[in-house]
Image (cartoon, grey):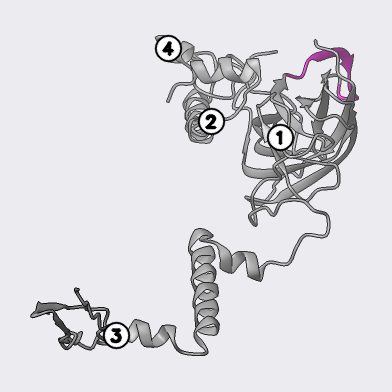
Amino acid sequence: MWVVAVSAVEGGAESSSEEGGVGTTTSKPAPTEPARKVGFLQRLEQHPRLSVLVALATFAALFVGVLAAVPDWREMLSEAPDPTGAPPTAEGSADPSLSVGSTEPSASSPDTPGLAFIDLVVRDPERTGDENSQGEEEWTQPIVEFTVHNRGVRRSVITRVIMTVEESVVIEQCGSQGFPIAVSATYDVLLPLFPSRRSVLEAPVSQQQGADEADRFALRFSTPERKNDVTIHIYRLRFELVADGTKSRLPAGTAVVAVPHAPATGDGYFWSDEDDGKSYPFADFPNRLSLIDCMKRNSATLDRFLLEEAELSPKFAESKEHLHL
């Protein structure tokens, strides 16, 4: 009969021997595993405060990421919110609801008035046919017309026209040889005889434009009593409109205004190409040479004055074409 003896060896190893019917058992020692090294990260995992450190590190990373994604975070933190809810505008910039020459609806707000400047026209004075106390013909006053368009959905009100005198000149007559569109309102403006350069004038107006409505109004210019009736005062004026109680100004172009009227070829104010083409101009004048010298000085003055781009009346534009030095 066979006898089998089984012995459990530590680590689960078994062995048996069959010899002479006697069963014996032997055990082998289990191999020893090398001790594992514990790294820095594993020690951190066993640290009791690990969750707090991870939370702080995660919050710091998120905060840095938000600041990096928003370049102007300093301005966002430093600026106080506008109580009106309107988006901030740069100092000195135009109000976003006011634009030049555009007829597109305002994108800032559906109920914000958006006033657009469309056109600037200078009208020449006309002879009235009446005579003044000296028996000379009267002239109407020069007029500058403004066409605007309210692009908004609310009524817009223009309250002022700001005029900056860029320059002014005075020319005298050197020698005498003898001599339209519906407007909703016209406002009188008295110009100083000798304004300083860059002086600012204001003309109160009251012009209303309904939603998506166009309008045209005019300024009529005059001066205090001049040296004499044939003395011409010429101004280059830059216009801006103030509307709807805002501090912003809507640019409305630049125009040359002449009071009482623009000088014309043949009126003895300036030397023209017609005069230059004559073989012996002003032969009947005893002061012929001084007359020609005066006209050429006026031509030089006007040529310098009209170098800058500005809207001219039809008569002034024609005179500019014939101007000769």
The boundaries of the magenta stretch are: 124-134
Q: Residue furthest front?
A: 1
- Of discs 4 and 2, which sits in the foreground? 2
Disc 3 or 2, which lies upstream in sequence?
Answer: 3
Disc 4 or 1, which lies upstream in sequence?
Answer: 1
Q: Report the residue marked by disc 1.
A: 107
Q: Nearer the viewer, residue 42 or 96?
A: 42
Which type of secondary structure does the marked residue at label 1 adopt?
loop
Q: Is residue 131 magenta?
A: yes
Q: Picture quarter containing residue 319?
A: top right
Q: Nearer the viewer, residue 56 or 110?
A: 56
Q: Report the residue marked by disc 4.
A: 280
- Of discs 3 and 4, which sits in the foreground? 3
**Crowding at label 4, few (<14), some or many (≥20) Cα neighbours within 10 Å?**
few
Image quarter of the N terminus: bottom left
Marks 2 and 1 sit apart, C-alpha to C-alpha, by 32 Å
Residue at horizontal 77 percent and vertical 51 percent from the top: 86
Q: Image height check: is 5 above or below 170?
A: below
Residue at horizontal 23 percent and vertical 81 percent from the top: 5
Residue at horizontal 62 percent and vertical 23 percent from the top: 312
Residue at horizontal 51 percent and vertical 61 percent from the top: 71
Disc 2 or 1, which lies upstream in sequence?
Answer: 1
Residue 155 placed where, x, y %? Answer: 90, 32
Amino acid of disc 2: Glu
Q: Report the residue marked by disc 3.
A: 39
Q: Image height check: is 35 above or below 65?
A: below
Marks 4 and 2 sit apart, C-alpha to C-alpha, by 35 Å
Amino acid of disc 3: Gly
Q: Report the residue marked by disc 2.
A: 309
Which type of secondary structure does the marked residue at label 2 adopt?
loop
Marks 3 and 2 sit apart, C-alpha to C-alpha, by 80 Å
